[in-house]
Amino acid sequence: MHKYIGLALIFPLVGFIINGLFGWRIKKEKVIGWFGSLTVGASFIVSFLIYLELVRLPFYERKFIVEYFSWIKTGGLDISFSYLVDPLSILMAMVVTGVGFLIHIYSIGYMHGDRGFARFFAYLNLFIFMMLTLVLADNYLLMFLGWEGVGLCSYLLIGFWYDKPFEKMTTSDAGRKAFIVNRIGDFGFLIGLFLMYKYFGSLNFNTVFSIANKLQVGDSTVFWITLLLFVGATGKSAQIPLYVWLPDAMAGPTPVSALIHAATMVTAGVYMIARSSVLYALAPTTMEIVAIIGALTAVYAASMGLVQNGIKKVLAYSTISQLGYMFLAMGVGAFSAGIFHLTTHAFFKALLFLGAGAVMHALDNEEDIQKMGGLKAHLPITYKTFFIASLAIAGIPPLSGFFSKDEILWGAYSQGSFWLWLLGAIGAFMTAFYMFRLVALVFETPPRYGAKHPHEAPKVMTLPLIVLGFFSVTAGFIGIPESFGLKNLFHHWLEPAFEDANAKLILESTHSTSTEFMLMFISVLISVGGILLARYLYLKRMNIVAKLTQTFSGVYKLVYNKYYVDEIYDTIVVKPIKWGSEKLLWRFFDVKVIDGIVNGSARVTSIVSSVVRFVQNGIVQFYAVVFLIGILIILWIIF
Amino acid sequence: MEWLQKHILTTIIFLPLVGALVISLINSERKNLIKFLGLFFSTLTFALSAYVFLKYEPQKTGFQFVEIYPWIRSLDISYKIGIDGISLLLLVLTTFLTPVGLLATWGSVDKRVKGYVIMFLLLETGMNGVFCALDTFLFYIFWETMLIPMYFIIGIWGGENRIYAAVKFVIYTMVGSLLMLVAIIALGNFASQLNGQFTGDLEKLYEVAPKVALNAQILMFLAFTLSFAIKVPLFPFHTWLPDAHVEAPTAGSVILAGVLLKMGTYGILRFSIPLFPEATFIFLPYIAVLAVIGIIYGALVSFVQPDLKKLVAYSSVSHLGFVVLGLMGLTIESVQGGLIQMVNHGLSTGALFMLVGMIYDRRHTRMIEEFGGLARVTPVYATFFMIVALSSLGLPGLNGFVGEFLILLGSFKSKFLGTTAFSILAASGVILAAVYLLTAYQRIFFGKVTKPENQNIKDLNLREIVSLAFVLIFIVWIGIYPNTFLKKSEPSVKKVVEQMEKYRSGIFRAQK
Amino acid sequence: MIPLSWYLFLSLILFTIGVLGVLIRRNAIVIFMCIELMLNSVNLALVGFSSYIGNEIGQMLVFFVLVVAAAEVSVGLAIIIAIFRNRLTVNIDEINLLKW
């Protein structure tokens, strides 16, 4: 079965081509929508069948490389369209296609009546294709193809409603920003690949990792390679300092935010590090940097989430913050915990976004939570699922988020340091707080939406919510910590992918189970505290909130305006480049200096000739006389 | 048939000329017939070159399809043509772009159609000749020949400021090429000193030239390379390019960007590097510096252009900088990348110019600020523009990426460049390309339709779609399966690179 | 037999007439004829030398000169006629367009 992994890629590609080329001719939304969705469904089935095949195989044989055809072959470089089927990639493929399938179905309802309906599905299908390429690739270059490809789809989909204004700009500005910021990250990624090729002589996972396996921990080139790859990851996965695009990416339609900017694409960086775990294990310094950046991002983004008023904005910052956790996990070497969080996060964050979409759908695309409230009665299914997802992300046992987040925190404490754990814990508190602030303001406080008539979304939209809700609750059970005395199925499944890396890391097991339980207890306490505080403040004592914002208006403004990072980037990077290019390089250097020299030499020529030309008086006989005199002079000189 | 097989390159070179002669006999009022014949002859030429592409056997060393007829016996100058993997790709590119360019601008030229088509066919003869010539004098003649039709194309069918642009183009190019002529003669002389026979035969010169004393090598290298650098154009010799592009008619721009610029880089690879290896080693870092400056400079300047065509023109400076960097890297990867990037640039920039021309035909302006929201009015046009822009900014899966990646990868590990800084700095051009192309794209296509004139722009017609689709096929093809082309050129490139490595390690000197 | 110097003197006289004619006359046709005269004086010298030295190359060259002269005459006269049609004059003082 694994030989047919290509099918998983081909289905969405066919969907893209057919919907893209002929979608505008097919007038029926149902046909387009279901066709687009079913291609993804089919590729989920393929992935699932391959998963079943892997399960049946012995533990260490669960790895296949399926090569289709050569892509770039010249000199020492030999890159193929070849795909790696192993526990990690097939897990990712199932998450992508599974969540993707649900979101496709949801979109049939959400995008109903949009004039770009076919285009939307074409883009979504292309995205799934690119994302699968990314996670299934067997070499870094093919991964990079997917990596840039998903960036493209993100660009296209953020700017999907390209003439719709968004904040101070338009949606297409947001799309462009996303693409360019991602490219900055990709610049690092590319350089990382060059260095890797120079050092290892290959970009194929197998070759690189097997050479890397023999290297010493602390190899300086590997440090640079991993660091540069991580730069790419900060771009794609919206970490400090390249996170700025993700909040703006909310300009796209909500299913896009759910699929691309929450569940799948943004986790690509995490996947990439997990895939390269062997390399990262060789570079402890990079690991530290990754952990610190991850922890800082987790807290920093969460702090911005506390005060945002756009329903999707809050979720966007929450995504950045959760991605921070995943990087924290990667950084401390808890690879499978990071992937575990990636998986559970995909469920509950997609659910949250889709819920937000249902809310906006009900309120004529209203995004401001100040103008919501009281939707509990009108949108019962959305409310319930949203509530469950919020509990999950806040980390309340036994929902999925609890297990995965707790594992990360435990990893941060046991293999990192107390400070990393503390940052994580603060982030967890904030997460619980802002999520339940959101739940309160959207669903539970008195209505503030004026004369609109909210209504529950149609079945195609609520059904995915329910399915995702189910997984948000149960997905955690596949990864119950060993300290509960059960087998951690998730870790076991991923073990082949990380065993080489784990062998390199000195995993300390000095901490006892009792410490683990204690930390677990503390973190639950923190989450519950956050939830209760949020509910207390926003449901009972709104006046305290108002007072607080007034007392700390400076801080509030700073955080509300996202620490003015966008403005800072604009002033110190964007504007000088624009000014310098136009005034200095073009108008001055190009036109004045270079062309000045060129045209100047032409001018000198014409000035000289304007004097000399008077010799040419047009009388041919005069020329002939001069000619004759010339000959005579020459003859006189010769003889 | 047998005759054709033996003389296929000559046929490819001169078939357009025959076409031009045939057209010159037709009444100039019969515009459609003339255009059709132009298209017919250029397409036939393409078909022949495609045949050559298929028949070319990369494993064989040396030049293939060689034809040689003595011309000036006493000086050993001959009509010698032949191709290797390097010229093969460019030959096919040329013969491909000429009919496509003609087809894409079928409706946009209305005055003196006859002369226009004739000039294009003459131009094609010149260009094909440049890529096939294996004799320095023959090369020089084709090199200069192709200048004349281009001069007229810009000067007669160009825009407002066409005379200035045409003269600037010709004089700029002449400055370099006259120096090249001096170097060609000097080279022949050195051959007669060392071998006892003056010669223009490139293959003989490959043997002789590297033995010339270093001082003379340096001078000749500079003369050749200056001529090529102007043509490329390498920063800071690029200022003719924006003017020429802006003023040239669309098909002229397509050919100018698509093929003429490649002659510069082709010349560097065919003449400068293998003829003067030691001089190359001396100047290689400086040229690479200029290339990298060109990459970044071109990108930054195109970022702020208000005129769409100028934007594309400056982006060419940036793209060609990549090619030169690749050539200077002198690794198989980077030179192969440079070669494929030449083809890519011809395709994607050619297509960009075609697209700009199409909107110019409709709105008679190229100012970016005049547009906005066109995605809604002309979705097909917007889609094509998007794909071509993506190809130009190097999105993996399309052609631009393959070239840029190979160049950067190769120059990163190049022993000749010695430092990775070139490659790293050049890679920032990849970011900047996204900046300027997407910014322009957004301002033209996204947002609301603000100008009433733009409400009723017609979308592309079938002819335009077909001509773009041809280019698009290759854009995707090279993006996904570049091996078709890489395979053909690899042995030739390898030969050059290995030769250079040999010179570098001094084996050659030691033997002497 | 007539000595060589006679031919040469004749040739010299013809050539001088030709040169002076080109320099002095104002009618384009006359100037043109004077150029022909110069060419023919050269021919005469060539033929004279050729028979004196006994080398036939000189006589061959004469044929070349004749051919070139014929070609030149046809082109030159065509130009003069074209000028006359435009300007209604062949006086070269009035057709001195070839100046700054």
Image (tube, grey):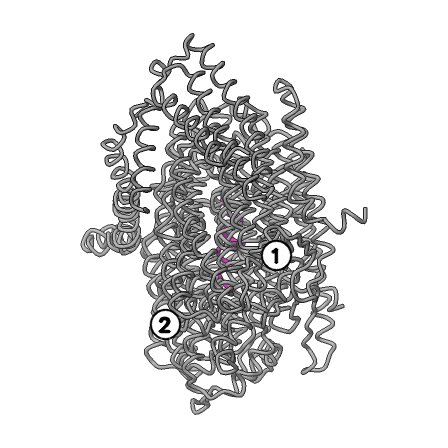
Which of B205 and A432 lies nearest the eye of the viewer? B205
Q: Position of residue A432 (x, y in %)?
A: 39, 63
Residue occupying the far bottom of the picture: A510
A410 in the magenta segment: no
What type of secondary structure mainly makes up the magenta span?
Answer: helix
Q: Residue at x 55, y 49 (%)?
A: A381
Q: Is residue B108 above or below residue A425?
A: above
Q: Residues within 10 Å of mark 1 (few under 14, many from 20)?
A: some
Q: Position of residue A169 (x, y in %)?
A: 36, 41
Looking at the rendered structure, whether the residues under marks 1 and 2 are on a common chain is answered as: yes
Left or right relative to A103: residue B296: left
Quarter of the image containing the N terminus of chain C? top right
Which of A508 and B34 lies nearest the eye of the viewer? B34
Asked if one can make out residue C28 in the rendered structure from this viewpoint, the answer is yes
**Residue where numbered disc 2 is placed:** A425
**Residue where numbered disc 1 is placed:** A467
Q: Position of residue B134 (x, y in %)?
A: 59, 56
Left or right relative to A487: residue B390: left
* Label 1 close to label 2 by CB (< 8 Å): no
Quarter of the image holding residue A47?
A: bottom right
Element on which disc 2 rests? helix
Asked if one can make out residue A343 in the rendered structure from this viewpoint, the answer is no
Q: Chain of mark 1?
A: A
Q: Amino acid at mark 2?
A: Ala
Q: Is residue C28 above or below residue B239?
A: above
Q: Position of residue B177 (x, y in %)?
A: 44, 49
